[in-house]
Amino acid sequence: MTELPDRTYVGGPNSLRGFKVGGLGQRDGPDSLGGDMGWGMGVSVLAPFWNKAHWPVRLHSFVNLGKVVGYEKGE
C-alpha cells in the first residue's frame, strides 16, 4: 500500500493551468488520490502588441498537457 505523501499530483498554475492543485487523477469524492507516475509539459508564448512595442502589456498564449497514472508491478 502506498501512503498519500508518496503519491504524484499534477495540476495548478505551475504545472497544469486550468486545474486546481492536485486536480488531475483519481478522486475519492472531493479528495485527490494522486498517482504513481505523472507528467506535465507546457508551451508559453509572449509577444508585444503590433506597432506598440513600448507598451508594458504583452499578448500571452499557452498550451499545457499532463497526466497522472497508477501502475501495477506485474504489468
Image (cartoon, helix red, strand yellow):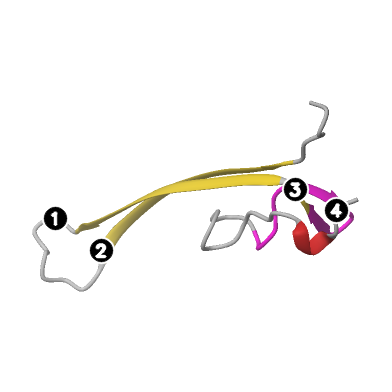
Asked if marks 4 and 3 touch (Cβ < 8 Å), the reply is: no
Where residue 32 sits in the image (x, y, percent)?
79, 57
Q: Answer with mark 4 or mark 1, whichever residue precedes in sequence.
A: 4
Q: Which mark is in front, 3 or 2?
A: 3
Identify the residue position indicated by label 1 in the image.
Answer: 50
**Amino acid type for the residue under numbered disc 3:** Gly
Q: Answer with mark 4 or mark 2, whichever residue precedes in sequence.
A: 4
The one of 33 and 50 positioned closer to us in this rendering: 33
**Amino acid type for the residue under numbered disc 2:** Arg
How much space separates mark 1 and mark 2, taking CA atoms? 10 Å
Q: Answer with mark 4 or mark 3, whichever residue precedes in sequence.
A: 4
Which residue is drawn at the image coordinates 81% and 34% (left, top)? 73
Which range of residues does the magenta coloring cover?
20-33
Checking the image for residue 58, the label placed there is 2
The one of 52 and 67 positioned closer to us in this rendering: 67
How much space separates mark 4 and mark 2, taking CA atoms? 45 Å
How much space separates mark 4 and mark 3, taking CA atoms? 10 Å
How packed mark 1 is, by other alpha carbons closer than 10 Å (few <14, some 14-19, many 20 or more), is few
